[in-house]
Image: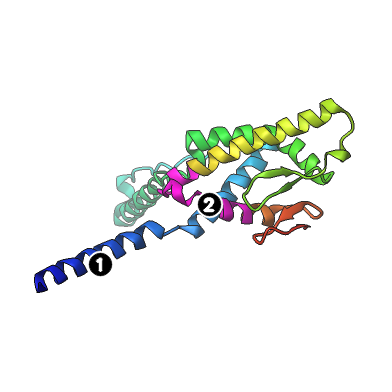
Amino acid sequence: MKRSIVIGLGCVAVLAACITINVYFPEAAVKELAQQIEDEVHKTAAGEAAPAPEPTPTPVAPSDEGGSESLLSYIFSLGATTAYAAEDEVAAPEITNPAIRKIIDSRATRLGAVNDLKARGVVGESNQALLVVRNLDAIQGLKERADAQKLVKDENADREQLFKEIAAAKNVDLAQLPQIRATYAETLRENAHAGDWIQRPDGAWGQK
């Protein structure tokens, strides 16, 4: 009897540990990545190229005339070169991930049009980190309205895929996509321009 109780308690402890692991969500890391992605979308849309890396300095071997002092300088320069090399070998951020990079480039092509619709009050940012059509009356013509709706559909399709790529990059279970959405929506609200329509976590809409 006692043995059964001990085994039962052990199973409960293991189950509790598993639950603790499964509910962990790296909110700060996802928030940081979301901001990096949004910054990159804007930079790409503006056509800003990343600066070329500076060449690593190559130390020159000392001559015999310099003596021990010259030799010490050479050794220290080798250490500096090693440090530069170590910095170059640091892993690249997730925005260089081909799948995420593709989405960034795609979103950048429509950023100007999206911002225009926001400025006119046609669309807003939901608390699910998706665009929502709010007022098509601001657009004249059936074709222009259809174009706006297609733009929203394409943008949201990219974002839906982006959330999944973020989950993969941060080793987050897809069951936690709602947390990724909420965290990304917070970033979008913070980055919104004055006058943009945004939906708060409680569901209420308002202009920033």
Q: Secondary structure at mark 2?
A: helix
**Which residue is located at x 9 percent, y 70 percent?**
3
Residue denoted by label 2: 178
Residue denoted by label 1: 13
**Which residue is located at x 50 percent, y 49 percent?**
177
Q: Position of residue 20 (x, y in %)?
A: 35, 63
Say what amino acid the circle numbered 1 marks.
Answer: Ala
Q: Nearer the viewer, residue 3 or 204?
A: 3
Helix, strand or loop for the magenta stretch, by majority: helix
Looking at the image, residue 102 sits to the left or right of residue 22; the answer is: right
Dot 2: within a 10 Å radius of its alpha carbon, few (fewer than 14), some, or many (20 or more) residues? few
Image quadrant holding the N terminus, namely bottom left
- Above or below, 12 against 157 in this view is below
Image quadrant holding the C terminus, namely bottom right
Quadrant in the picture for residue 183: bottom right
Residue 59 shown in magenta: no
Dot 1: within a 10 Å radius of its alpha carbon, few (fewer than 14), some, or many (20 or more) residues? few
Q: How far apart are the two marked residues, 1 and 2, measured between alpha carbons?
A: 28 Å
Q: Which residues are magenta?
A: 165-186
Say what amino acid the circle numbered 2 marks.
Answer: Pro
Res 33 visible: yes
Looking at the image, residue 35 sits to the left or right of residue 120; the answer is: left
Q: Position of residue 42 (x, y in %)?
A: 67, 42
**Which residue is located at x 87 percent, y 35 percent?**
139
Q: Tag count in the figure?
A: 2
